[in-house]
Every structure is written in C-alpha cells, then in structure tokens.
Amino acid sequence: MGTIIHWNGGGWKSSDSLDELFHLLETEPLRPSLAPYVAQSPRFEYFTKFFGNFATVSHGFCVETDDMDLVARFVEALKRNPRG
C-alpha cells in the first residue's frame, strides 16, 4: 500500500496534514469547475487520485493512494462536502 501526496495546502504551505484536508472537506465547498475530484491514477495501476481546490479557501490538493481505507474516507468526505 502507498499514498503519494503531490500537494496539499494553500498559500506558501505545501504540505498540511491530511486531517486538515478532511476538516476542510467537511466545512468548505469545493470549487465546482474542478469536479469530479476523483479519477483513476494515470501513473499508478490500482491507485485512485483525489484532487481539487476550494471555492472560498485557497487549499489545493492532489493525493494518489491504493489504501482502501483512505479511499473510503475520501469518498465519504466528498459525498458530504457542502457544495454551494
């Protein structure tokens, strides 16, 4: 299993914790123009890629993982995201 965090943060920060990202996914709407926010990884077989930014907070993210628990956590967080 592996997880690659390509970027996760806003402003000058480039690597906030994934806990901070999940907090933002619960409280801040995602930018609709970047939907669907999830795709099959183009580089790594069996990896899922999660990516996006927020509509009201500058915090871009791109995470690729084959950790099924983390995939499930992202999927649930995306379903619950308060989209505007």
Image (spheres, rainbow, N blue to C red):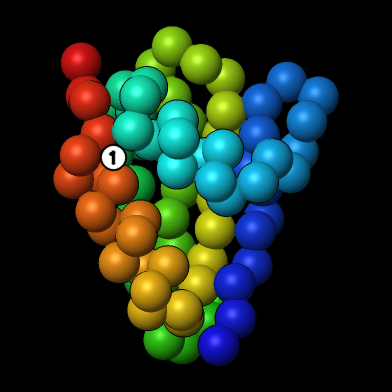
Left or right side of 78 for 22? right
The residue lying at 53 percent from left, 82 percent from top is 44
Classify residue 78 by image quadrant. Answer: top left
Disc tally is 1
Q: Return the residue at label 1.
A: 35
Residue 34 in view: yes
Residue 68 percent location from the top left of the image: 37, 79
For the N terminus, give its image quadrant: bottom right
Residue 75 percent location from the top left of the image: 27, 57
Q: Residues within 10 Å of mark 1 (few under 14, many from 20)?
A: few
In this view, 2 is above or below 36: below
Q: Amino acid at mark 1?
A: Ala
The residue lying at 41 percent from left, 86 percent from top is 46
In this view, 71 is above or below 57: below
Left or right side of 76 for 40? right
Residue placed most toward the observer, 23 or 46: 23
